């Protein structure tokens, strides 16, 4: 189910992205031959208004095939190659732009329909993290914390404060109420490496407070902006050497992360989908041949030179970029497999 869910999310992101290119091209008047979801062998196709809509075997991509994109395909007066630099930039940017629009809409949906998560200050466990001390000791979701080492607990804030004051790696006695019965469990806390304080690996209960539609729209844009900034900072670290290429995740890693997000609930899954959509938008605007960003750059160069680049040279550059991207996918997949082996 995790694999199916991951494929559905990827397909939606690609569909939205390519739909942006498609609509922009049609509005400008560019001849479109095919709108494809996926690569490889054709599984299904239907022709309407001169456009072939197809579904292909490999769902990790898609494309809008327009007249005038391939070397030697220069006969159509409405081809992509015949358009002005500005029109080419609009078509190239439309795909990534729609990924940002999708992210905004997802966040608006979360804030307006589901709500903003707010912690509940009751000393009741909302979630237990697998393989952490609380999980290993047998604590469960819904357990009410009555005391820690005979010290009475009246709120979640009390509970966190007492745990953080206790020394790590030393057994502590936690008194709980479960299904109306009181019992005691021995838990050995570990250390939170970022704070240096003791933790058990549990979360408090949360409730969701819906925002009004106007606040939800505002927060949708704010959240998309903040996530975009974080992703750009991460990309900058990767380029500058502050992050390693081993941190890259490929299809296997994304599938695993989708599974983790799904286990966290619908809010986490939708938020992760928005994250992936922004990620796709940013990556496609990088000036790497074969990506939308390179077509955008070629259009700027054309505007400066007042003439387009030689189609064969541009095609060769895109082909080299495609090979580079395939290499990155192989590297990222290798990283995924190594992480799975190491656990």
Image (tube, rainbow, N blue to C red):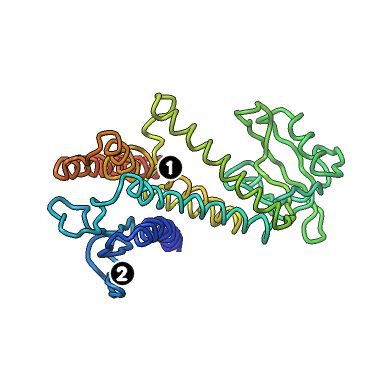
Q: Which residue is mark 2?
A: 53
Quadrant of the drawing holding the C terminus: top left
Q: Position of residue 77 (x, y in %)?
A: 21, 58
Q: Residue at x 63, y 56 (%)?
A: 110
Total marks placed? 2
Q: Position of residue 156 (x, y in %)?
A: 79, 43
Q: Position of residue 89 (x, y in %)?
A: 36, 46
Q: Is residue 164 above or below residue 222?
A: above
Q: Which residue is mark 1?
A: 282
Q: Residue at x 76, y 37 (%)?
A: 160
Depth order, front residue of 29/324: 29
Who is closer to the viewer here, 74 or 223? 74
Label 2 to label 1: alpha-carbon separation:
26 Å
Q: Secondary structure at mark 2?
A: strand
Residue lying at 65% horizontally and 26% vertically, measured from the top left: 196
Residue at image location 15% in from the left, 55% down from the top: 73
């Amino acid at each position: 189910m995790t694999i199916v869910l991951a494929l559905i999310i990827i397909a939606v992101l690609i569909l939205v992205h390519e739909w942006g290119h498609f609509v922009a091209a049609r509005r400008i008047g560019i001849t479109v031959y095919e709108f494809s979801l996926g690569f490889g062998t054709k599984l299904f196709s239907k022709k309407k208004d001169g456009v072939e809509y197809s579904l292909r075997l490999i769902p990790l991509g898609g494309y809008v095939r327009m007249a005038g994109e391939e070397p030697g395909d220069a006969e159509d007066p409405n081809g992509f190659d015949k358009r002005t630099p500005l029109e080419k930039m609009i078509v190239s940017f439309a795909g990534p732009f729609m990924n940002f629009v999708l992210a905004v809409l997802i966040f608006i949906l979360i804030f307006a329909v589901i709500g903003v998560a707010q912690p509940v200050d009751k000393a009741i466990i909302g979630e237990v993290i697998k393989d952490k001390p609380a999980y290993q000791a047998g604590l469960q979701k819904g357990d009410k914390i009555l005391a820690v080492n005979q010290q009475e607990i009246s709120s979640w804030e009390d509970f966190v404060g007492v745990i953080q004051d206790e020394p790590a790696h030393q057994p502590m006695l936690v008194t709980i109420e479960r299904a109306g019965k009181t019992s005691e469990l021995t838990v050995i806390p570990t250390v939170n490496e970022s704070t240096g304080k003791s933790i058990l690996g549990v979360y408090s209960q949360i409730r969701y407070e819906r925002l009004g539609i106007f606040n939800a729209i505002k927060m949708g844009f704010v959240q998309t902006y903040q996530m975009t900034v974080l992703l750009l900072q991460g990309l900058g670290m990767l380029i500058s050497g502050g992050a390693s290429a081993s941190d890259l995740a490929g299809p296997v890693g994304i599938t695993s992360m989708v599974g983790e997000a799904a286990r966290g609930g619908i809010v986490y899954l939708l938020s992760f989908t928005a994250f992936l959509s922004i990620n796709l938008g940013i990556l496609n605007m990088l000036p790497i041949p074969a990506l939308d960003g390179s077509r955008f750059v070629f259009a700027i160069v054309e505007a400066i030179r007042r003439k387009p680049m030689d189609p064969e040279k541009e095609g060769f550059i895109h082909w080299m970029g495609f090979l580079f991207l395939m290499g990155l996918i192989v590297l990222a997949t290798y990283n995924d497999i190594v992480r799975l082996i190491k656990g």
